[in-house]
Image (cartoon, grey):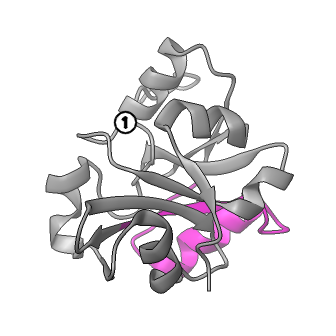
Amino acid sequence: MKKGKQPKTNAIRILDKAKIAYKLHEYPWSPNYSDSQTSLEELDPTRQKLFKTIVTIGDRTGVVVTCIPGKSEIDLKALAKVSGNKKMELLHLADLEKTTGYIRGGCSPIGMKKQFPVYLSKDVQNLGTMIVSAGRRGFQVELAPQALKKLVAAEFAAIEA
């Protein structure tokens, strides 16, 4: 990629088309999880604005996408309740790309292959901005939670353990 040239992932194209304000962050991605995690923490030292995208499957609704704080764990029982399922499980990593179009470490709630139900941590409502994957390893996008909610037709819910 040429210096100064912004990557155009599906997520970025969708944000541009919708005229949603965002800030793109680039960080050095490494296959060593702890190295990438350290780089991500430099984007958000308080670890309050950095959110991870987790893809799950419900026994009634099928695929459900969540965004929770990076330091949190998902509560599958709470997610099942708010999403109308009896049981939830994490999507197998082997199925992530064929289901969403994204790979681990670059999975964005924006621009998946299909429009899935999306649940955002209720705590994000108190933040001015949040940071989620821009759809490629090494890139994150910072935007207003309400803008993301509207764009992906998400709901706020208490879904962390």
Residue displayed at 63% across by 55% down: 156
The picture places residue 9, in percent across and down from the top left corner, at 39, 32
Residue flagged by tag 1: what amino acid is it?
Gly
The picture places residue 95, in percent across and down from the top left corner, at 16, 66
Say which quarter of the image contains residue 106.
bottom left
Which part of the image, by quadrant, shows the C terminus?
bottom right
Disc 1 packing (10 Å; few <14; some 14–19; many ≥20): many
Say which quarter of the image contains residue 80.
bottom left
Residue displayed at 29% across by 51% down: 102
Residue in the foreground of this view, choosing between 103 and 62: 62
Residue pointed to by mark 1: 111
Residue displayed at 29% across by 57% down: 103
* Relative to 4, residue 97 above or below: below
The picture places residue 107, in percent across and down from the top left corner, at 39, 54
Say which quarter of the image contains residue 148.
top right
Q: Is residue 139 found inside the magenta-colored segment of the image?
A: no
Q: Is residue 51 found inside the magenta-colored segment of the image?
A: yes
Q: Which residues are magenta?
A: 27-55
Which part of the image, by quadrant, shows the N terminus?
top left
Residue in the foreground of this view, choosing between 120 and 101: 120
